[in-house]
């Protein structure tokens, strides 16, 4: 018998009385300057110049240090920066002044500790985590740590989190020597001469080092001695690549780079790994690291539900959150009890069937493997069974007739064959399929324009008003993927498989707002902005989507675009919860508040931040007092303030041996945090494209992918529609 569950997290409060003195410095600038970018650049240089601990606090817009530097010395340092031509924004720095304040904000103190005081433990922690290193033939897996700065009810805190990363052995040059025909565009790489740097994408191969004045150009700009030596000693035949993005990029020889393996690179690099760490394994490393940090004397113990019960909540136990899903004939099922969504729909039937009894299907095969025809036939049979076969003890309410409009079409596409693709899909559209199931390779390489075969296919399907479901070769015969396809097909033919039994009482609509910006290649300072709203009823049914795009100067979404997305005829007098993927910019909120006031509506803003959040764990004891660690259940909450919380929004079987990553939920104005959390959790159950509920609500799920698609021009002809083309 299991006794009460104790929740705890990775956040340690800071004992302010034990901190060294802090001094605060303001940057004085001329003109329009990105103060954060300038502050970060100065931070590294001022720390080298004066020593001590220096931190740039984005929240406070100040440099914070444990050293008091008098004004004349600060003037000398400013003049030193003016001479440094490696950063032209230093020319806009007029001076650095001491701020005469006793203390900064709690966030500033947290920044000072997490980015400064405890950084001296980096090497010691890295050495301990080296014990976790697992070697494979061509790569290795290891744990890395990350510090974070937090404020919990005005109490400054730091967090320490772990994650696994995969690095290829050797340099990018070594990789190409071993695999000479590999496509490296799209891989992410690190500078081997820098201990701390972020992986950046290879966006172009510039040519070889010996061409023209390329070697001399690189040597002229490089200041770091190790990098300079690498360039000097590299052969003329060595490749030079461009890494970064269209906004800011850098040129490197490939022997100065190593590969950082991201999830999307697994297939192309022949890697089959699941970077999941069960709670016990994660805590085996992290708890000793907590003790090391606490030895400094200014960090207290982590928050727990025993010591800090006022900060922890359980949605199901304390807020009475137990949603029901509604199916055909008002049949209801507890959302948390659903193990197989397809089976529940087969048993009870769709809440609202599509207005058709026959589904017309086309199959497009882009694979070149000889075995693909056989695999597709297996998929066809499994897919057909999902609709027609009576399951023992369940039955089958999905009695659609499936009709193949033609035999599977083989499409062998050479490079630069968009006209052939357009021709084939144009011909296919004349047969009026309800859905095209398109079989694609496991790995799709990017062109220099950043597009893949998936992008070209999706855009062409939408051009001809065809709904499509993409299916990778590796998933053709897996039952889980087949079930996901079944759900996606139902949604795309106009079916509503299920909705929430009880409406969300505090709103009329939930709207997911996605925004994507792409810098125009030949127009400096000009951005292409695409914005999309996905509107759901208060029972989670997709009402419709709206897409708008524009070319603008700067970064702010034009008000005219927001007015188009939130029109009077649809939102007048309505209560609307708006979910935003990531931070919700102040300018956008103010513009939306202005719109709401003019149309007599009430808009509630919810920011959903999905990455970089410290984890929450569970600990139980049995009757004998023996304790064990476990994952925190879905609906577990840690309150950061009255308007912000960490939320466990996902659940998965124990066989996945992972620790859930919380979402960070933030509300604004007078919208209660409890309602914001409730709206997010409720909509995690309404994603029709997956057997298992995702950790994100359907309102922001796929937000990154959708906004990227739309910004590339991949969107339906109808900018307002009700078919979820993104599934």
Image (cartoon, rainbow, N blue to C red):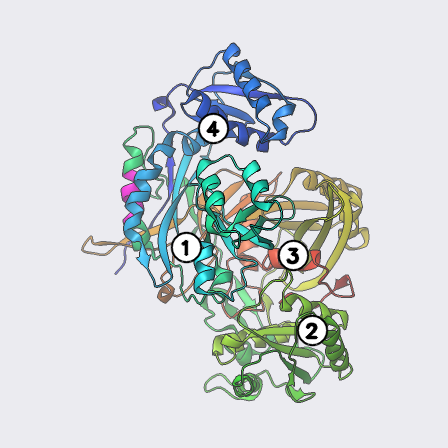
For mark 1, give the secondary structure. strand
Name the spot of residue 723 as percent of width and height, x first.
70, 68
Q: Main secondary structure of the magenta part?
A: helix
Task: Name the one closer to the observer, 370 or 486.
Answer: 370
Q: Circles 1 and 3: CB distance less than 8 Å?
A: no
Q: Is residue 163 left or right of residue 452?
A: left
Q: Nearer the viewer, mark 2 or mark 4?
A: 4
Name the spot of residue 285 as percent of width and height, x first.
29, 48
For mark 4, give the secondary structure. strand
Q: Nearer the viewer, mark 3 or mark 2?
A: 3
Q: Nearer the viewer, mark 1 or mark 4?
A: 1
- Reading the image, the residue beneath label 2 is 467
Tell me where the magenta segment starts and ends, as one range.
284-291
Q: Quadrant of the N terminus?
A: bottom left
Q: Quadrant of the C terminus?
A: bottom right
- Reading the image, the residue beneath label 3 is 708
Marks 4 and 3 sit apart, C-alpha to C-alpha, by 34 Å
- Reading the image, the residue beneath label 1 is 167
Marks 2 and 1 sit apart, C-alpha to C-alpha, by 38 Å
Is-magenta flag for residue 254?
no
Q: Is residue 574 above or below residue 101?
A: below
Q: Is residue 333 left or right of residue 623?
A: right
User: What is the number of callouts on the image?
Assistant: 4
């Amino acid at each position: 018998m299991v006794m009460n569950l104790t929740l705890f997290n990775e956040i340690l409060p800071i004992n302010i009385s034990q901190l060294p003195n802090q001094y605060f410095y303001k940057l004085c600038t001329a003109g329009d300057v990105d103060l954060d970018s300038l502050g970060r650049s100065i931070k590294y240089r001022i720390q080298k110049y004066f020593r001590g601990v220096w931190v740039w606090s984005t929240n406070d817009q100040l440099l914070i240090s444990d050293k008091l530097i008098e004004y004349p010395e600060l003037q000398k340092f400013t003049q030193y920066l003016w001479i440094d031509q490696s950063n032209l924004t230093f020319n806009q720095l007029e001076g650095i002044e001491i701020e005469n304040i006793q203390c900064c904000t709690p966030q500033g103190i947290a920044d000072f500790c997490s980015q400064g005081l405890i950084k001296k433990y980096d090497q010691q922690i890295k050495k301990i985590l080296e014990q976790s290193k697992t070697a494979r033939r061509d790569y290795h897996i290891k744990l890395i740590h990350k510090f974070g700065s937090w404020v919990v009810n005005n109490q400054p805190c730091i967090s320490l989190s772990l994650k696994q990363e995969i690095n290829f052995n050797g340099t990018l040059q070594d990789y190409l020597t071993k695999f000479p025909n590999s496509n490296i565009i799209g891989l992410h790489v690190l500078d081997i001469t820098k201990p701390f740097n972020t992986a950046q994408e290879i966006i172009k191969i510039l040519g070889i080092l010996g061409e023209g004045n390329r070697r001399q150009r690189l040597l002229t700009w490089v200041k770091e001695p190790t990098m300079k030596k690498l360039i000097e000693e590299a052969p003329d035949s060595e490749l030079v690549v461009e890494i970064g993005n269209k906004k800011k990029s850098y040129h490197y020889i490939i022997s100065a780079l190593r590969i950082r393996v991201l999830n999307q690179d697994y297939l192309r690099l022949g890697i089959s790994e699941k970077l999941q760490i069960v709670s016990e394994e994660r805590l085996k490393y992290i708890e000793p690291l907590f003790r090391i940090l606490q030895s400094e004397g200014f960090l207290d113990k982590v928050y727990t539900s025993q010591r800090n019960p006022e900060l922890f909540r359980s949605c199901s136990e304390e807020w009475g959150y137990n949603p029901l899903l509604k199916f055909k004939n008002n049949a209801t099922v507890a959302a948390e009890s659903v193990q197989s969504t397809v089976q529940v729909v087969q048993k009870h039937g769709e809440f609202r069937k599509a207005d058709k009894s026959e589904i017309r299907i086309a199959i497009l095969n882009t694979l070149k493997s000889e075995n693909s025809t056989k695999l597709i036939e297996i998929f066809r049979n499994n897919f057909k069974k999902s609709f027609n076969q009576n399951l023992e003890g369940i039955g089958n309410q999905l009695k659609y007739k499936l009709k193949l409009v033609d035999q599977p079409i083989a499409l062998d596409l050479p490079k630069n064959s968009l006209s052939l693709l357009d021709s084939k899909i144009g011909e296919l559209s004349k047969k009026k399929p309800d859905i095209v199931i398109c079989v694609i390779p496991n790995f799709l390489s990017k062109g220099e324009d950043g597009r893949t075969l998936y992008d070209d296919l999706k855009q062409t399907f939408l051009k001809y008003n065809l709904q499509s479901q993409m299916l990778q070769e590796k998933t053709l015969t897996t039952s889980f993927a087949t079930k996901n396809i079944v759900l996606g097909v139902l949604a795309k033919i106009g079916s509503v498989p299920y909705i929430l039994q009880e409406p969300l009482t505090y709103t009329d609509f939930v709207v997911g707002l996605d925004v994507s910006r792409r810098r125009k290649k030949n127009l400096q300072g000009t951005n292409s902005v695409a914005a999309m709203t996905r509107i759901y009823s208060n029972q989670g049914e997709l009402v419709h989507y709206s897409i708008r795009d524009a070319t603008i100067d700067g970064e702010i979404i034009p008000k005219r675009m927001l007015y188009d997305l939130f029109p009077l005829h649809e939102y007048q007098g309505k209560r609307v919860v708006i979910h935003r993927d990531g931070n919700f910019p102040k300018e956008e909120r103010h513009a939306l508040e202005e719109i709401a006031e003019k149309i007599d509506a009430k808009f509630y803003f919810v920011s959903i931040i999905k990455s970089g959040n410290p984890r929450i764990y569970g600990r139980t004891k049995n009757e004998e007092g023996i304790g064990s660690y476990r994952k925190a259940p879905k609906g577990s909450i840690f309150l950061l303030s009255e308007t912000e919380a960490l939320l466990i929004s996902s659940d998965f079987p124990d066989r996945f041996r992972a620790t859930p990553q919380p979402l960070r939920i933030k509300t604004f104005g007078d919208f209660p945090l409890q309602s914001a959390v409730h709206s997010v959790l409720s909509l995690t159950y309404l994603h029709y494209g997956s057997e298992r509920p995702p950790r994100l609500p359907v309102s922001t799920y796929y937000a990154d992918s959708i906004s990227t698609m739309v910004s590339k021009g991949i969107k339906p002809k109808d900018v307002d529609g009700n078919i979820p083309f993104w599934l």
